[in-house]
Amino acid sequence: MLQVAERCEVCGLDLSNHDSGDGPAVFVIFALGIIVVPLALWVETVFQPPLWLHAVLWSLVILAGALGLLRLFKGVLVALQYKHRGTAHD
């Protein structure tokens, strides 16, 4: 689980009340869908691999993409939350 640090290591800003919730996961799903679906259709059209290969290939691509993008999107959403609200509200 990716957690927001209690305080910024550089400036000491209190981040304990900031949380992005499920927002980053939603944006990662949309981003990966926009990228993976056209690629999968292109690979099917050009190479026509068996279905098991599609399952293995795109599962790995989606897993790697989700792990790579989730931290970035979470950081961006916490930064946007801080910029627009200043402090988190319950």
Image (cartoon, helix red, strand yellow):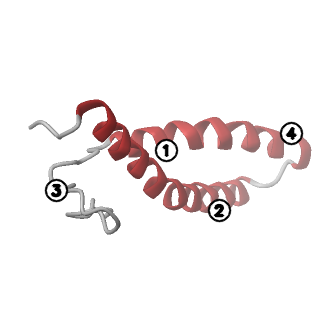
Q: Quadrant of the C terminus?
A: top left
Farthest front residue? 11
Q: How crowded is mark 1: few (under 14 residues within 10 Å), some or many (20 or more)?
A: many
Real-space CA distance between mark 1 and mark 3, rounded to the nearest whole angstrom: 24 Å
Q: Which residue is drawn at 37% across and 38% down?
A: 80
Q: Mark 1 points at which residue?
A: 28
Q: Which residue is drawn at 48% across and 53% down?
A: 72
Mark closest to the chain's N terminus, 2 or 4: 4
Q: Is residue 16 above or below residue 33?
A: below
Mark closest to the chain's N terminus, 3 or 4: 3
Farthest right residue? 46
* Left or right: 74, with 5 as reference point: right
**Residue 16's disc number:** 3
Amino acid type, callout 1: Val
Secondary structure beneath label 1? helix
Q: Mark 4 points at which residue?
A: 45
